[in-house]
């Protein structure tokens, strides 16, 4: 009951802020909730809209897979080599804070327009946090676990599966949750600057032609999807920490 009340209160607060912004800025900047939801229903009936959704989801799936697999693999490799990890961590932290949009010209020169640029934008946003969380997970392993594995004379494979995997999974899952959100952000930015298809393209095109209704509605759709997906991953994250 408390969670339901909190959820209703948050939704009510968001609607109040939304209506307040509309009252302040008017139709030149944002559309009201009812008109936005009505246009969302209209968009859902258009085949052309779903082609843009498909383009975004395809790029996002590829970028997320690369971010997750490469981020975990490189994070494990750096985390298991203490000196390499100590050198790489501040470098990765610095790269993480750089506004990735500044790399836009370079990314276009390397990947050009289209799918590859969108995927690259997603990867550079999402892979670094996955690497950092994975490195931290390896660094924080309790030494007693490894000593116990040696005392029990477990093979490297058994040690990895029965000792390392359960110990590392919670932090890696947290890194993947953060990487999920940032990868989606990167793909949308890539679509805004380096594509003529996708939800990001619809948002930036709406801004350019002053289609406030399109911009507001697509932004709402993206936000709802991101919040719902992040909520599911947060629940999985808490479950992983609970069983750790």
Image: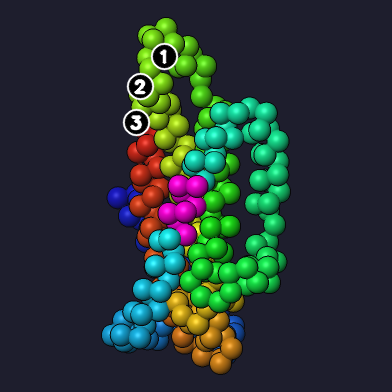
Q: How far apart are marks 3 and 1 (CA)?
A: 20 Å
Residue 48: x %, y % from top left? 35, 86
Given the current orientation, which residue lies at the most extreme front position?
A: 110
| Whether label 3 touches label 1, CB < 8 Å | no
Please give the residue where the numbered disc 1 appears in the rendered image: 149
Residue 64: x %, y % from top left? 45, 56
Range of magenta residues: 63-70
Q: Distance between the residues labelled 2 and 3?
A: 19 Å
Q: In the displayed structure, would residue 198 be above or below residue 173?
A: below
* Residue 158: assigned label: 2
Label 1 CA crowd tier, 10 Å (few <14, some 14–19, many 20+): some
Name which residue lies at 56% across and 91% down.
Answer: 210
Quadrant housing residue 207: bottom right
Name which residue lies at 57% across and 32% down.
Answer: 79
127 left or right of 8 in image: right
Total labels: the figure holds 3
Q: Distance between the residues labelled 1 and 2?
A: 9 Å
Please give the residue where the numbered disc 3 appears in the rendered image: 243
Q: Earlier in the sequence, mark 2 or mark 3?
A: 2
Give the main secondary structure of the magenta stretch.
Answer: helix
Q: In the displayed structure, would residue 148 be above or below residue 37?
A: above
């Amino acid at each position: 009951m408390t969670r339901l009340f909190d959820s209703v209160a948050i939704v009510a607060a968001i609607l109040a802020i939304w209506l307040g912004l509309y009252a302040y800025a008017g139709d030149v900047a944002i559309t009201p909730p009812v008109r936005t939801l009505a246009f969302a229903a209209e968009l859902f009936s258009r085949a052309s809209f779903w082609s843009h959704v498909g383009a975004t989801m395809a790029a996002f799936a590829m970028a997320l897979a690369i971010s997750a697999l490469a981020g975990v693999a490189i994070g494990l490799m750096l985390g298991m080599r203490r000196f390499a990890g100590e050198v790489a961590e501040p470098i990765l932290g610095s790269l993480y804070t750089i506004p990735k949009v500044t790399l836009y010209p370079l990314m276009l020169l390397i990947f050009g327009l289209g799918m590859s640029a969108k995927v690259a934008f997603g990867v550079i946003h999402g892979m670094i946090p996955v690497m950092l969380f994975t490195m931290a997970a390896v660094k924080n392993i309790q030494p007693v676990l490894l000593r116990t594995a040696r005392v029990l004379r477990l093979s490297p494979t058994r040690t990895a599966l029965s000792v390392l995997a359960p110990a590392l999974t919670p932090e890696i899952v947290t890194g993947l949750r953060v990487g999920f959100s940032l990868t989606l952000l990167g793909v949308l930015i890539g679509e805004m600057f380096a594509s003529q298809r996708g939800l990001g393209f619809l948002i930036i095109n709406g801004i350019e032609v002053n289609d406030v209704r399109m911009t507001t509605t697509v932004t709402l759709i993206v936000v709802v999807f991101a919040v719902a997906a992040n909520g599911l991953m947060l629940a999985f994250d808490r479950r992983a920490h609970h069983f750790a």
